[in-house]
Amino acid sequence: MKGRQSYLIEHILKFLRWLENEGLAIEEIYADEWPVRSFPPAEEMKFQEACDIIRFIDEIPGGFLIYRAAEEEQLLYANRGVLHMFRCSTMAEFKELTGNTFRGVVCSEDLERVEKSIEKQVFESRKNLDYVEYRIRRKDGSVCWVEDYGHFVRDDAVGDVFYVFLGDSSEERSRQQEEQKRLLEEALEKANMAVKAKNTFLSNISHDMRTPLNAIFGFTSLAKLNIDRTDTVMGYLDQIEKAGHQLLDMITKVLDVSALYNAAGPTEVECDLCSVVQDVYDFLYPQAKEKSISFTLDCDSIVHSGIYADQEKLRQLILSLANNAVTYTKPGGRVSITLTEEEAMLDDFAVYHLVVADNGIGIGEEYLESIFEPFGREKNSTLSGVHGIGLGLTIAKSIVDMMHGKIEVESAVNKGSTFTVNLAFRVQPLQDDFGKEDIAVFQAGLRILLVEDNDINREIETELLERIGFVIDPVENGRIALERMEQASAGDYDLIIMDLQMPVMNGWEAAAAIRRLPDPALAHIPIISLSADILLADRRRALECGIDVCLTKPMEYDALLESIEKLTNWRNS
């Protein structure tokens, strides 16, 4: 059966040939007195159909044209949309403008590329629309871009032809060019800002490092001249030591920033939050006392001081903020560190607020937007009277981002600054969830295969479950768990506790494979899944894979023991 495309094109072209033979322009089909002559009786119905199709095509948005695929590429038909694109009033004008060929439609600069695209469609992807963009030159001499969606048709009745949908893409091209220009301007601006920041940093660090170096060389010379005056020389040595510490602090901060940019994410370990803050306070207290600064610490409202966090990065964060406050507060001023904890907890996570406030020199409003940028300082040491290279706040911001927290600053010149950091940490249990009586009852224990890919989680869960009285066999992924079960005998394990998101083989795959084991005693072992983030669809998938109970992390011991009891009749065993 002839394709619908060929059928329509055949009748359109036959109707157009009839118009040409009758000496009629295609535009005359819209005349009020049309038809001026009768259609041939044998073709009347088909010609009327073709006439209606052409009228319809003339109303569609965009252009539509038909041309022969032979070497001359003769134009056969163009709708009103095409004429409008080329600023032509009639088909005759359009044919004259283009030389009545498709080659004349395309600007010569784009013709070779367009011809290759068309040739590719003819020989490689005849079933698909060909897409290509090119420029056209309109009757008024202007140039615009068009989108061309063409399709090749081969038919015995009409020969090889292309029909093409054209769309004006000049506006989109202009938008893309404007967007590209905007992006380039932004990139240039950022590059200029980076160069400016680098130059400012080099200027500041050169100045600020030369200042303590000048002191070191100067006091060294004075010490040599007063070598016999012990008290005087000791004073000079104290000044040399102070200048040396200033240099060391600058170098340390540069290395800290470099290390943070190349560091992996934070590593969680057990630590005491209040102790970390206290250590920083104790470290800075002598410096504050030397400047007669009122330096206070308040952690009294903390309930859950034991947390899991990267202790070193946490200390570095607090030290950067507190040291910055002490450094930029004048003698006789005040600095406070306050740590509070929100009452509400979610899944054993607590939210903490660290506030470091001072009444020091403050920060100008125009500088607040860039305060956390590397090597940024409002003033050098000569203007501010404070030595440093402006990296302390960059270090603090990098650590807060690494810990998925938030840092905010409020400041005013000569009134001081307040930095507020919000962080969430998983808390350590305040005490065992079960009394000695429970542990005694559970001492016989169950043999549990614990499947957990995270080393820290696996260690914590193993220790806590063993303290209850269970015998734990920890493995790091589902593949190893499956191998253990394949090698096991009935009774080697009483239960499997398994994470879902794991490398090599995840929990869903491992559970499904275990359920397919040939030994019924092994295939029907109870499985409890533990996952940090499980959606309803994941939970449904877990049950379909044969997992009996789905629990979320962090581990809730009451819920876990209740599930174990239901699955194994453990308490009565």
Image: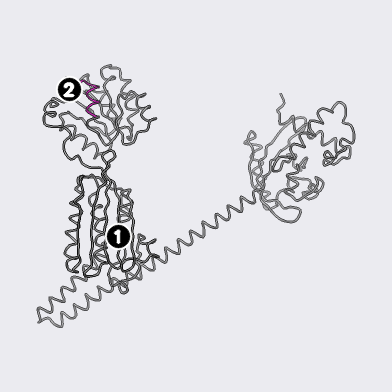
Q: Going 25% across and 66% down the picture, which residue do you hit?
A: 327
Tell which of 237 and 105 is nearer to you. 237
Say which amino acid is labelled 2: Arg
Q: Nearer the viewer, mark 1 or mark 2?
A: 1
Which amino acid type is shown beneath numbered disc 1? Thr
Q: Is mark 1 on a helix, strand or loop?
A: strand
In primary-sequence order, the first of circles 1 and 2 is: 1
Q: Which label belongs to residue 571? A: 2
Question: Which range is magenta?
Answer: 560-573
Residue that mark 1 sits on: 418
Q: Is residue 565 magenta?
A: yes
- SS of the residue under disc 2: helix
User: Quick check: 196 above or below 427?
Assistant: below
Q: Residue at x 61, y 54 (%)?
A: 174
The quarter in which the C terminus is drawn is top left
How crowded is the residue under tag 2: few (<14 C-alpha within 10 Å), some, or many (20+)? Answer: some
Distance (Cα) linking label 1 and label 2:
55 Å
Q: Residues within 10 Å of mark 1 (few under 14, many from 20)?
A: many
Q: Where is residue 24 in the image (x, y as percent from the top left)?
A: 87, 40
Between 357 and 135, the residue placed more toward the observer is: 357
